Amino acid sequence: MIPAIPQATTLDEVIEYLTQIINHSIEENDRAGYFAALYYKVTVRVKQGVESGQFGDGKISRGLTFISPTDILMRSKNGEAANP
């Protein structure tokens, strides 16, 4: 089972929590780690874009990434829509 992770409030927290999920998935041989790894790569790129000014002031892009990684992964494992 994926460990419970609190709602992230920064891109760095999202990246940290995804790293925890990825590591847990490796230890448990859980396929949810594939989605977490993809989400991790996208989040890192979004962070790089925010830091380089690619998204203007970055407010919209920061808000889009703060969906709980645990919530998305659990919903995807249960076959539910991954909407917040």
Image (cartoon, rainbow, N blue to C red):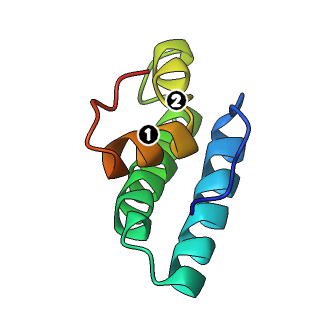
- Identify the residue shown where x is 40% and y is 64%: 32
Which residue is tagged 1? 72
Q: Amino acid at mark 1?
A: Ile
- Identify the residue shown where x is 51% and y is 46%: 48
Which quarter of the figure has residue 6? top right
Residue 15 point in image, percent of width and height: 62, 52
Residue 35 image label:
none
- Identify the residue shown where x is 53% and y is 43%: 69
Q: Crowding near pointer 2: few (<14 within 10 Å), some, many (20+)?
A: some
Camera-nearest residue between 22 and 52: 22
In the image: residue 71, left or right of residue 13: left
Q: Crowding near pointer 1: few (<14 within 10 Å), some, many (20+)?
A: some
Which quarter of the figure has residue 8? top right
| In the image, residue 26 above or below residue 12 | below
Which residue is tagged 2? 67
Which quarter of the figure has residue 14? top right
How many marks overall?
2
| In the image, residue 29 above or below residue 72 | below
Q: CA distance from mark 2 to mark 1?
A: 7 Å
Camera-nearest residue between 12 and 79: 79
| In the image, residue 41 above or below residue 69 | below
Asked if the residues shown at circle 2 and circle 1 are in contact, with their CB atoms under 8 angstroms apart, the answer is yes
Residue 25 point in image, percent of width and height: 52, 74
In the image: residue 3, left or right of residue 46: right
